[in-house]
Amino acid sequence: MLVHPLFALFHVTSIMENFPDVELKNAFCNGIEQMHATEWIAAILSFWCVVLAAKNSIWNWPVALIGSMIYAFVFLESALYSDALLNAIFVIFQIYGWMSWRKNSVVGEPLRPTFGQRKSILKVLVIALFIYPFWVYVISSGLFGKTLAAVLSGDYFLVTPGVGKHIQMPIIAPPRFIYIDAMLLFLSLSALYMQAKKWIQNWILWIVVDLIYVPVYWLNHNYITAFLYLIYIPIAVKGYQMWKNESKQFSLVERNTSD
């Protein structure tokens, strides 16, 4: 049985209040105090969407959509640019996944969880691997930060040359965890695409992503998000089992029908 997202988050908070490691406890509590309401909302929505996805509910997509939009701004403020972009791109992928699942529901034949072919999965990962170095260059060269600053200041959209120079540019912090952050960007997009296709292996990739994200967010002082990704791991394991069992049930029904 999967837990309710609100209960899980507050349960983690109560555990940390009685945690023996004083330094870890203080870091967590300070993170709680410094958290904006937007990060709380994003964390709860993101947790809820994972639970719904594990239950194979189509409602995981609209919930995830809202959570990703909020998280894009949260990570932008934390200078985790790959994560900010990831959540912005997530919105596109989530619309695609929502429409894909909904299309099959309207037709009357729900999209069934299946094991994706190795060739198809490898193709997705290879495409991500080729784009990876380009994104690392864009981030490390400062090109993304400069472009983002120009867009946020309005200079990018100004027709009259030089007008934007009189506008105070927003402060864009140096990027953090460039290589790991970029790697997680493309692994997450690959996993989300596989989820939209209802390939069962998407959960395995999510487990890998979650395991790496926990220390990244903790070191960046996004403590609640770090714990959130820690909680994602057992849910992803459960999701893998549930999708696998559902796939077996569909296969048994098809056999009995054909016989």
Image: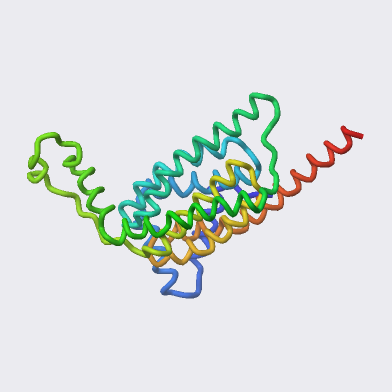
Residue sitting at 65 percent across and 43 percent down? Answer: 55
Which colour assignment does the render follow?
A: rainbow
On screen, residue 184 versus residue 3, left or right, reads left
Report the quarter where the C terminus lies: top right
The location of residue 251, given as percent across then percent down, is: 81, 41
- In depth, the one of 34 and 169 nearer the eye is 169
- In depth, the one of 187 and 246 nearer the eye is 187
The location of residue 200, given as percent across then percent down, is: 66, 49
Total count of labels? 0
The location of residue 202, given as percent across then percent down, is: 61, 51
- Which residue reaches farthest right? 259
Residue sitting at 56 percent across and 39 percent down? Answer: 60
Residue sitting at 62 percent across and 57 percent down? Answer: 204
On screen, residue 163 versus residue 119, left or right, reads left
The location of residue 15, given as percent across then percent down, is: 53, 63
Residue 118 position (above or below residue 167):
below
Residue sitting at 34 percent across and 47 percent down? Answer: 73
On screen, residue 108 versus residue 51, left or right, reads right
On screen, residue 157 versus residue 74, left or right, reads left
